[in-house]
Image: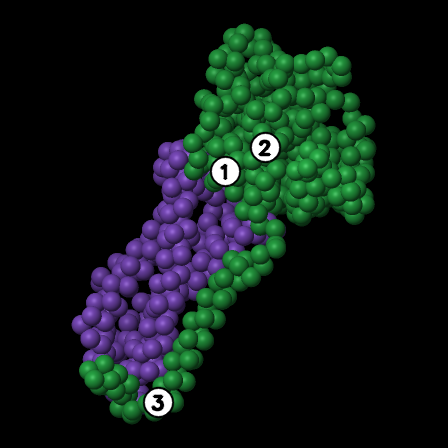
Amino acid sequence: MSTQRLQFTSFSRLLHWTMAAMVLTMLCIGVAMVASLADYHVLVSIHRPVGIAILILVVVRFVNRLLNPPPPLPATMSRAERLAATGSEFTMYGLMFALPLVGWGMLSAADYPVTLYGSLHLPAILPHNVTLYAALRKGHTVLAYLFFMMFVAHVGAILFHTLIVRDGVLRRMAPWNIRPQGATSTD
Amino acid sequence: MNNQRRFLVRTVGAGVELGKASALARFALIGVALAAVTATFAYVGGWFTPNELTPARFADGFERVNGVHSGFRRNHAKGVGVSGFFESNGNGVRLSKALVFRAGRVPVIGRFSLGGGHPDAADTAAAVRGLGLQFSLPDGELWRTAMIHLPVFPFSTPEAFYEQMLASQPDARTGKPDPATMASFLARHPETVRAMTVIKNQPVSSGFDNSTFHGLNAFCFINSAGDSIPVRWLLTPMQPFEAASASAAHDKNYLFDSLIAQIHRQPLRWHLIVIVGQPGDPTHDATIAWPEERDNLDVGTLTLDRVESDDTSAATDLNFDPLVLPAGIVPSDDPLLSARSAVYSQSFTRRAGETKQPSAITPLAARKGQ
């Protein structure tokens, strides 16, 4: 019980780190594939199914977030900072949901098959319309860059709290379990 | 004052105050970490390699040579849409598990085109004739292929294609391509010289209807036993061959006009032939044809019975990406394949965001003889 108050649940932490790796990989694949002739096809073939996996996982994660409220934020954080932290958290959920959905939608609007693996493919979610495709394709890029900036800001904030403020905020999401009392040293 | 106090409070979160030097060092560490993450992202995105050929730079090359024609493909800009069906005879099943090869009929939509980025170019016997096709498989899978009438492709790499495209650009002063640039290109690319000889030795037919279309690149078929078989494919016309007349003066759209008239008269048909490669046949080089004695398997008949202007055809809004493949067909190691997919996609994205101008072959012209 008290462990849960210090840290996110182990399932929440597993989702966080798994998806963090997936999202960072996807942002890099995305920016690399559009600039590559030789690896374009291989990278796109990975980008599609991983994107859909993120879409499924973020729904699981969002439900999990509502069922399991996070541990309290450190007392060092001001009201504005708390608002920024929670706001950016939900913005990132939104991006994890929107990016794959826009990707799926734009492939649909371009009448590209949404192939996951082999003959396994998803249905179109939008009608074939190239003007719509052009808008969504642009939106996909804009959202991806926005997500990358959110990612950098997120890492920067965590590092600030860990190295400067030293309020143990990273412990809430540490992949290992941290004991609530006495077992944790201040440094 | 207030800020300073606030900073002091903030740096003593762990109960021990950070010295000024220590705090600075920690801030520097954070800065370096974030810069490293950003630099990695920029690096994989190609920001540090501005001379590398990318899909965008490839499309820029097309635009430099041909100009930007709003809403049109950056290459094979002039064309007409067609549709019909493919009737498989079932022969292909032993080579590939793709559903398109099971005996039966699947709908096809396609587009005949001329190579080059000018949507209003005059038809000539020397122009490259293209045929893009989409087969719609019963389970919703798609197979797209973009074929041309040349027996081999003149370039083995995307870089060579790009270099030759820029070399063939007319010089601003002379109005003609610089012969020295082209000679230097050919000296460095003997495979292009060899391919051009093969291409020149193939007699050119009178029109689209009696042209043979080649899939250009090698692919691999995967059959139900899991075997991977190197293949190439081509469409051989059932319309009798007639040599292109070299002398006669032609109308600007004579190739398309005669195609339109023929389709309205009777459906046009092609055999889909699969060339079955042997282990060791080069799959990575589109400039080299496989030996004549390779098995040619007729896997079915393509029938095209409708033709439409690019202004109304559904094919206009399709990207005939040669790597839209059903299960049972996979890319070979030919570097042109991924590059084609990437550049077609770039061209498609650019034109999708533009307002399309009317096509040279108007809806009225496409109805002539109906």
| Distance from the alpha carbon under mark 3 to that under mark 1 | 56 Å
Residue B241 in the image: above or below residue A20: above
Asked if the residue under mark 1 is in contact with the one under mark 2, i.e. CB atoms within 8 Å, the reply is: no
| Chain with purple colouring | A
Query: Which residue position is annotated with label 1?
Result: B348
Give the class, few, some or many, for how many residues have Cα within 10 Å of label 2's Cα (few <14, many ≥20): many
User: Would you identify the image quadrant in which residue A1 lies?
Assistant: bottom left
Query: Which residue position is annotated with label 3?
Result: B20
- Whether labels 3 and 1 share one chain: yes
| Residue shown at the point (62%, 27%) measured from the top left | B114
| Distance from the alpha carbon under mark 3 to that under mark 2 | 63 Å
Residue B129: image x %, image y %? 65, 26
Q: In the rendered structure, which disc, 3 or 1, sits on the residue that comes first in sequence?
A: 3
Which marked residue is nearer to the observer: mark 2 or mark 1?
Answer: 2
Residue B188: image x %, image y %? 79, 47
| Chain with green colouring | B
